[in-house]
Amino acid sequence: MAMAAAYGERALAAPVDLNHTGHYVHWGVVQISVANLVVIGLMVLVFAAAVLLPFPKGRGRR
């Protein structure tokens, strides 16, 4: 039973080792973590895709 509990804990572990200080990007007075920068980039990418991709057109509707 202890083996199953250990496997369950490993299955819920983060895919990246989070046991260290974060990495930061500096632009003058602006400082942002790399993780937040990646999230913001993905949000901008999804927003751009939502704006640029065409809406599906209904068939047979007047």
Image (tube, grey):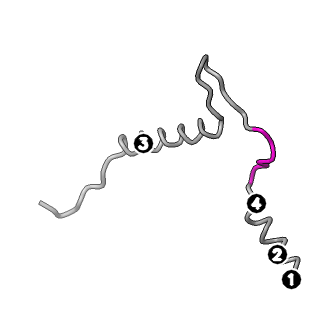
Three-letter amino acid code at the position of disc 1: Met
Where residue 52 sits, quadrant-wise, is top left
Specify the label residue 1 is tagged with: 1
* Residue tagged 4: 13
Q: Are marks 3 and 1 in contact (CB under 8 Å)?
A: no
Q: What amino acid is found at the position of numbered circle 2 in the picture?
A: Ala
Q: Quadrant of the C terminus?
A: bottom left
Of the two numbered discs 4 and 3 in the rendering, the one whose residue sits closer to the viewer? 4
Q: Residue 5 vs residue 54: left or right? A: right
Quadrant, the N terminus: bottom right
For the stretch drawn in magenta, what is the main secondary structure?
loop
> Three-letter amino acid code at disc 4?
Ala
Residue 19: in magenta span: yes
Q: Secondary structure at mark 4?
A: loop
Q: Would you call the spot at circle 3 few (<14 residues within 10 Å), some (14-19), or many (20 or more)? A: few
Left or right: 45 in relation to 18: left
**Callout 1 environment at 10 Å: few (<14), some (14 to 19), or many (20+)?**
few
Q: Residue furthest bottom?
A: 1
Is residue 53 a member of the stretch shown in magenta? no
Residue linked to disc 3: 47
How crowded pointer 4 is (Cα within 10 Å; few <14, some 14-19, many 20+) is rated as few
Seen at 88% across and 78% down, the residue is 2
Report the magenta residues as a range. Answer: 15-21
